[in-house]
Image (cartoon, helix red, strand yellow):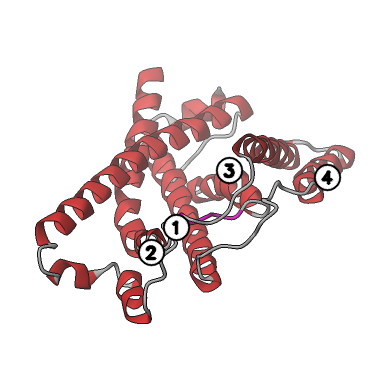
Amino acid sequence: MTIRILLAALLAGILAGLAITPVQALRTTPLIIAAEAYEDGGAPSAHEHGALSLATPALAHAPGAGADAGGTSAARLGGTALANIVLGAGFALLLLSVSLVSGRAITARNGAVWGLLGFATLTLAPALGLPPELPAMPAADLGARQLWWLMAVLCTGLGIGVLTLARPAGLRAAGAALIVVPMMIAAPHPAELASPIPPTLAAEFAVASLTTSAIFWVLIGGLTGLALERFGTAGRLARA
């Protein structure tokens, strides 16, 4: 039974990783490619920026760029797919672990809710202080950002858990307070905020990144619940 539960979660995560890859290719990858043109201090013209924002279709027809552009694009897509599969499997196992600890089963009906809670904990809450960044954007010390991110995730996760599982009003209030704590502590930011990246491009990437992540988490939660039911293990989790 344990092996079936693990296999169900892994299968769901792999499928979610494969499903989100084309979404990223359409929504976030073109913005990353556009930002990469600014990394060396360059500033593409309006025409070039428009082409990059549309997933650089013009590059495929540039002299001598056919094979290289196609190979680079295929390598990027393959790397993204592999990373998504690994992340999807890991996140599905994480949701499964929380389900086992809490005694609340993940099903096809509530799987999307589980996914949204995972998104709120691991993506949305940290992004309120440290929004998604494009290449060439200034950033604070990595260690400081990692500590703040970890604090935001732990406070949000514990807060959601208390709100969901606790019955006394006092404990629920404490859970809500934990969720607010990261917002009261300023996230680390660089002293110099000047960036070659256009603000509109950075804002568009932040929105696209968060939207894609939300879809990814919903897929992970929904597919995990569906897989657990198909494997006949959802009821076992509820009794664990």
* Measured Cα–Cα span from mark 4 to mark 1: 28 Å
- Check if mark 2's residue and mark 3's residue have beta carbons within 8 Å: no
Q: Amino acid at mark 2?
A: Arg
The answer to whether marks 2 and 1 mark residues whose Cβ atoms lie closer than 8 Å is: yes
Q: Which mark is residue 27?
A: 2
Q: Is residue 237 left or right of residue 156?
A: left
59 over 170 or under it: above or below: below
Q: CA distance from mark 2 to mark 1?
A: 8 Å
Please say whether residue 41 is visible from this viewpoint. Answer: yes
Residue annotated with mark 1 = 212
Secondary structure at numbered mark 1: helix
Q: Which mark is residue 177?
A: 4
Q: Which residue is mark 3?
A: 122
Question: Dot 3 lies on which element?
Answer: helix
Which of discs 2 and 1 lies nearer the camera? The answer is 2
Give the spatial CA distance, label 4 vs label 3. 18 Å
Disc on the earlier residue, 2 or 3: 2
The kind of secondary structure element at disc 2 is helix
- The residues colored magenta run 131-135
Give me the residue at 63% from left, 51% from top: 130
Q: Residues within 10 Å of mark 1 (few under 14, many from 20)?
A: some
Labels 4 and 2: the sequence-earlier one: 2
Does residue 57 sit above or below 214 in this rendering? Answer: below
In terms of depth relative to the viewer, which is nearer, 236 or 30? 30
Distance of label 1 from label 3 (alpha carbons): 14 Å
